[in-house]
Amino acid sequence: MEGQPVQPAPEETPRNTNPANVGLELFGYVGIEAVLDQMRIKTMKTGFEFNLMVVGQSGLGKSTMVNTLFKSKVSRKPTGPGYEEHIPKTVQLQSVTHIIEEKGVKMKLTVTDTPGFGDQINNENCWDPIIKYINEQYEKYLREEILISRKRKIPDTRVHSCVYFVPPTGHWLRPLDLEFMRRLSKIVNVVPVIAKADTLTLEERAEFKQRIQKDLKAHGISVYPQEDFDDNPDDRILNDKIRDKIPFAVVGADKEHQVNGKRVLGRKTKWGIIEVENPAHCEFPLLRDLLIRSHLQDLKDITHNVHYESYRVQRLNESNRLALSPVNGLLGKDEVESDL
Amino acid sequence: MASSEVARQLQNDNCRPLSLSGHVGFDSLPDQLVNKSVNQGFCFNILCIGETGIGKSTLIDTLFNTSFDDRVSTHFQPNVRLRAQTYELQESNVRLKLTIVNTVGFGDQINKEDSYQPIVDYIDAQFEAYLQEELKIKRSLYNYHDTRIHVCLYFISPTGHSLKTLDLLTMKNLDSKVNIIPVIAKADTISKTELQKFKIKLMSELVSNGVQIYQFPTDDETISKINATMNGHLPFAVVGSMEEMKIGNKMVKARQYPWGIVQVENENHCDFVKLREMLICTNMEDLREQTHARHYELYRRCKLEEMGFRDTGPENKPVSLQETYEAKRHEFFGELQRKEEEMRQMFVQRVKEKEAILKEAERELQAKFEHLKRLHQEERMKLEEKRKLLEDDMIAFNKRKAATELLQAQAFASTPSVSLKKDKDRKKDPGFRLELLCFDVRDHEIVNVQEQSEREKLERDRISHREFQK
């Protein structure tokens, strides 16, 4: 048990306007830390929700990647040969929702796919349907939050993370990539990955990454983990390490093969077997750790505290301005500040 | 099972359960969440209601094992006040921001009708502050210092009979706003058998009066059994003490009496351990959640409905908050315009009135001025007349003077001795005259005297006229 020196606290009027924070020493066991267990039990009871969006041109391996991430057939796209994929004329968004459970922890996973992105000849404004979808989710949540009698647990369909697949050209980011990431990093957490990284050698990979990082910095695009939201020095150190390696070079595979007597997920080619979970081969483990094992809660928190709040501010100001135009700024102090 | 409940719930939303073929790793999610909360710290606010001297501060000290505040309050408070103090406690790696709100002067007044009102107002004020923060456009809820009361410990006096009316009234007013846990204070004054009867009586009184006290939750199987038993022991009979005594070979917190020692942490002696376990170890999170999900939502709903916001319109169509707000805004603006018009009218009217008054005053002033002028004129004329009279008088006098002088001259011409005397007498010096009179006093006394008196009379008249003319 630790404590801080005792200081006297001043007397207060009925309103607790300026609480004096006093650090006090505990002389014996009280049991405050049991609240952690209580919290754990409560969250396991209510379950978690996670909404992921994958964006990229067709054929980059998005569906395979999602299946590999969650080790199950989340996205049921037939990937065998002889299958003609129908490329839609405009960008469509398809969501599938699954409930997965591991060691008593239940998670409701929603994966949104974007077939048709970047596939047309004229790709202008192909990001508009995506932005509209993301904002619609925010709007839905906002409407639920403003109700008079609202639900105890508001269903959360907001996109927590958007994984953007960069084709492995080895050169620079294309104008489409830059435009998309620039617009979307403002409203959602964008995690760029280099898709089908087994076409790049290690040196090419390193160079490509450098160039991408330079490009992103030059255009002022802040991808996840954003530098502004590091809470404390420990987080900063951890996130700096991650930022060095962004974008992750990943390979997706859902078939298992035998390697050295073990069954591993990998791609079998004539020149060898690329093990997906081997950090020496590709950076898939890093991506999985970032998305699921260590930063999932952080992704959700940043979506809720930052992106959703900025959407809310913008939306409320908008309706304020619309409403105020005949009236010109009249808002009584005793009346509630927000509207909608 | 709780987990199957969740599965059913989630399944209702058109999603399929999926089986995993390997270890994905999101079972660390609760840990991630817990770590985040530990970084942020926890907030817990306790409200203690009870009469002065019933042992509120001592119990809180004993619960959290520290000495918070040494001050003892007097019994002479004119009305009930609330005193809030915030402390930061730390145990292993958990930081707790604890706020303790005490009622000062509860039950001390002669007229206790309004005793519960300051408490209700305080609780509402905390809800209001949170609501305002939540409704702001630019808000920061995640680092907002939550001051809403999570639990209210109501201290009942150990009379052994039943609840006091004040207690019943206060609890009835508070049960929909805060989680109430009643405790019997100073339980070492009641014997075991009396205590049993007292507890049963109290609970039946609470139930029959419809007071909803906080029931420990029994839906989670890990803690439902223990919570159910604890629910049966309500209200807890507690003893608080920070003094330590050596019992056997350990130091325990106890109260020493001539007839024995009451150990605070001995379950046979009092229910303190049960209270601590229920309040802190097992249900702190649930208390916080109930406050947020039930009491706060109720307050929010009432407040927003009061202000006129509704979810569904008159024909049961969903009405967005915006439309309602628009309508209200137009109403408000209309009202404002009307008020402005009214004020303007009133202003114009007042101005007119004032103008009229001023004009009236001006006229009066004018009339006065005229009047004064006239008076002045009259005075002047009177004076003119007087002057004329006086001037006439003067002229008349001058004529008389001339006439008498002529007479005098004639008189001098007839008597030479007199003229001699006259030359000498012309000298006005009285001393000289007196000497002369001493020489010739027998002969000319009578004549001189007569002439002298006449001359003196003329002189006097002349002097008086001259003075008047001056």
Image (spheres, rainbow, N blue to C red):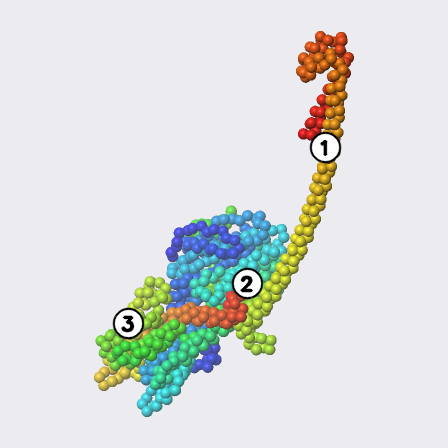
The crowd level at tag 1 (other Cα within 10 Å; few <14, some 14-19, many 20+) is some
Location of residue A242 with respect to B44 vertically, above or below: below
Q: Chain of mark 2?
A: A
Give the residue number, with chain letter if any, for mark 2: A334
Residue under circle 1?
B391
Give the left or right position of residue B393, taking residue A198 as reference: right
* Residue A154 in picture, x, y percent from top left: 48, 73
What residue is shown at x 55% (from left), y 71% (from top)? B326
Q: Nearer the viewer, residue A20 or A267?
A: A20
Mark 1 or 3: in front is 1
Residue type of the residue flagged with mark 1: Glu
The image's mark for residue A214 is 3
Which of the 4 image quadrants contains residue A119?
bottom left
Q: Secondary structure at mark 1?
A: helix
Q: How far across and how far down the image is residue A147, in percent? A: 52, 72
Per the model, the C-alpha gap separating discs 1 and 3 is 123 Å
Residue B389 visible, this orientation? yes
Return the x and y of residue B453 as percentages of the image width and height: 75, 18
Does residue A219 appear to the left or right of B338 in the view shown?
A: left
Residue B287 in sight: no
In the image, residue A131 lies at what x, y percent? 41, 77
Res A280 label: none
Give the structural element (helix, strand or loop) at label 3.
helix
Q: Residue at x 59, y 68 (%)?
A: B334
Within 10 angstroms of label 2, few (less than 14), some, or many (20 or more) residues? few
